[in-house]
Image (spheres, rainbow, N blue to C red):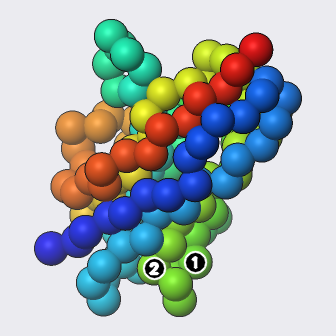
Amino acid sequence: QVQLVESGGGLVQAGGSLRLSCVASGRTFSSYAMGWFRQAPGKEREFVAGIGVSRFITYYADSVQGRFTISRDNAKNTVYLQMNSLKPEDTGVYYCGARNSVVPTTTWTLYNYWGQGTQVTVSS
């Protein structure tokens, strides 16, 4: 069993930055691929970024490529999402997911565990 707790969300102006954190419980964090997803009101949950068991394996949605960076610190059981040059369309609840696999996926139903989410609001 893995429990995930996200933090770092908030209100920021367009062009600003935020760093989200997701802390995992348990001793097997390093064996899980991790993903960040977001969900805006009335929309489906969408993939943002993913990182494999190897920190060198990273995937990004086209909409955030070059602006967001995902990373992990296995010693701290934490995955991060650095978000720069934020846009109003980045607004939503951001969720952290853990997948019992060596690689992440863009399909949210293939993740085994989820956090409660953290709200990100970008004003224009």
Q: Residue 96 appears at what percent x and percent y?
A: 40, 52
**Is residue 99 shown left or right of residue 34?**
left
Q: Quickly name the residue at label 1.
A: 73
Type of the residue with mark 1: Asp
Q: Dot 2 lies on which element? A: loop
Q: Pointer 1: residues within 10 angstroms few (<14), some, or many (20+)?
A: few
Q: Residue furthest top?
A: 42
Residue 83 visible at all? yes
Residue 83 in which image quadrant: top right
| Quadrant, the C terminus | top right
Q: Is residue 65 visible?
A: no
Q: Quadrant of residue 42?
A: top left
* Relative image position of residue 36 (x, y in whole percent): 46, 46
- The reply to whether discs 1 and 2 touch (Cβ–Cβ < 8 Å) is yes
The CA span between labels 1 and 2 is: 6 Å
Residue in the picture at 43% in, 71% down: 23
Q: Position of residue 63 (x, y in %)?
A: 65, 23
> Which residue is depicted at the point 20% across and 55% down?
112
Q: Where does label 2 land, which residue?
A: 77
Q: Position of 10 compared to 43: left or right?
A: right
Provide residue 119's location: percent of width, then percent of height.
48, 38
Where 71 sits versus 9, above or below?
below
Residue closer to the observer: 37 or 17: 17
Relative side of 89 to 17, left or right: left
